[in-house]
Amino acid sequence: GRLKMAKNLARTGEQAFQKMDKINAEVFTLTYGAMVQQLLKDHEDINEVNAQLDKMGYSIGQRLIDELLAKCNLGACADLRETAEVMSKVGFKMFLGVAANVAGWNQAETEFSLLLQENPLTDLVELPEELRGLKYCNVLCGVLRGALEMINLRVECDYLKCTLWGDAATEIRVRLVEKMEDQYPFDDE
């Protein structure tokens, strides 16, 4: 069951990636890097830069989820486990060109990690020692929060590991805070 679903999602992710308009990966990486540099100039505090990256990602995620749902013709996910697989195999592939792996579920199945062995955002980047606290790809945490909130899942995301810090992979921890009820903008009376 789950293995077949993962293979189908990997295929869906590949097909969605093929349909996407592409920009040169190097241009994208350099543009993102320039944006991070500007934030570092504008804000003295690295924690503020991390918060700004998350905030930008949140807005981006709210829009990307619409595109993912429109292009992939996926139905509603049965549970958080299936949602995690769709994000990792379809969402990451579609928008970053690389798939993530899902690992480290907690017993209640409300927390998991997304692992990126390759991360195009960190290509061509070296962090100087004084920027060790910079969560360079924190925009991804915001993207996940924004996208999931649009499908009524409030989550918290922590950027735990980064290849720029010497880790083997990028790791983002995702924790379900609340399944929200659908909000209807009008009364049914």
Image (tube, rainbow, N blue to C red):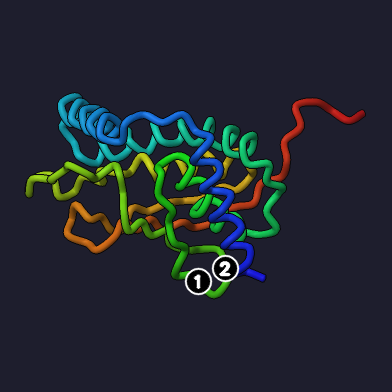
The image quadrant that residue 169 belongs to is: bottom left
- Considering every residue shown, the one lying at the far bottom of the view is 107
* Residue under numbered circle 2: 109
177 relative position to 185: left or right: left
Q: Quadrant of the N terminus?
A: bottom right
Q: Amino acid at mark 1?
A: Asn
**Quadrant of residue 38 within the rendered picture:** top left
Q: Residues within 10 Å of mark 1 (few under 14, many from 20)?
A: few
Percent position of residue 147, x then y: 54, 40
Decide which of 82, 52 is in the foreground and name it.
82
Does residue 81 appear anywhere in the picture?
A: no
Q: Nearer the viewer, residue 106 or 92?
A: 92
Label 2 sits on a secondary structure element that is loop
**In the drawing, what numbered circle is on residue 106?**
1
Label 2, label 1: how far apart the Cα atoms are? 5 Å
Compared with 38, 54 (above or below) is below
Q: Is residue 104 left or right of residue 81?
A: left
At x 46%, y 51%, the residue is 156
Say whether marks 2 and 1 touch (CB < 8 Å): yes
Q: Is residue 92 visible?
A: yes
Residue at 22 percent of width and 33 percent of height: 33
- Measured as percent of width and height from the top left, residue 44 is found at 15, 31
Residue that lies at the very extreme toward the left in this rendered image: 129
| Label 1: which secondary element | loop
Dot 2 amino acid type: Glu
